[in-house]
Amino acid sequence: MELNNKMTNTEKIQRMRNNARVWIYQSNRELSTDETLEIENKLAHFTENWTAHNQQLLATAFINYNRFIVLMVDESQAGASGCSIDKSVNFIKEIEKDYHIDLFDRLHIAYKLDYKVDSVSASEFEKLIKAGIVNQETIVFNNLVNTKLELATNWELPIIRSWHKDYFSSALPLITLD
């Protein structure tokens, strides 16, 4: 399967297999519309030229909620190697530096309240739970998903169904089954 560079990102994503590999980088702040457009252009250029052992990778990338950078590689033609993954990490680090954002803090928790996505440190998130602002039904983002299918089915979850439930178990009220 070849991804034509003239395809829209949506078309590229739709053509990717469900087992396409995914990496999610969450910004510690919401990106402006201008920043999102600039970064998406950089992502398009990067994925169009991303190779592993001199083979073009079937890759695409996009930004969701002006906060999450998602890289996706369909490895049916060529697998992402250690060197190609290092290239992507270095590219993401350049974005971090250029836009003064943190994309590698795995304990910066993103959540959705009233259809708005926000993020806070783990300690702030625990305070939100204890204050009753966040509860076990609050949608959180599981940035540990590994495939396109997991992105579609297990990325946005209520706390009760995510790894956050265990991490914040001391702050969450006990769950009772009726």
Image (spheres, rainbow, N blue to C red):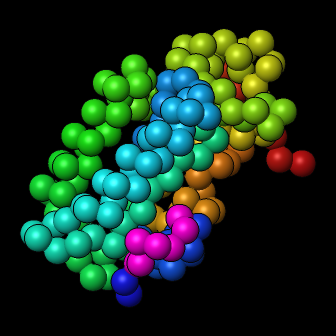
Residue 117, x across and y down, in percent: 69, 33
Going 84% across and 33% down the picture, which residue do you hit?
Answer: 114
Question: Residue most toward the right?
Answer: 178
Say left or right for 164 vs 16: right
Residue 116, x across and y down, in percent: 76, 33
Going 59% across and 52% down the picture, which residue do you hit?
Answer: 155
- Which region of the structure is painted magenta? 3-9
Say left or right for 40 vs 125: left
Going 83% across and 47% down the picture, which residue do you hit?
Answer: 177
Residue 143, x across and y down, in percent: 49, 45
Q: Quadrant of residue 138?
A: top right
The quarter of the rendered structure image containing the N terminus is: bottom left
Q: Is residue 156 above or below residue 126?
A: below
Count of numbered badges drawn on the protein: 0
**167 inside magenta stretch:** no
Q: Is residue 146 above or below residue 101?
A: below
Question: Residue most toward the bottom?
Answer: 1
Q: Quadrant of residue 133?
A: top right
Residue 74, x across and y down, in percent: 37, 73
- In this view, the residue in front, 4 or 30, is 4
Q: Is residue 78 above or below residue 128?
A: below
Going 32% across and 82% down the picture, which residue do you hit?
Answer: 76
Say left or right for 128 vs 170: right
Is there any visible trace of residue 22 in the rendered image?
no
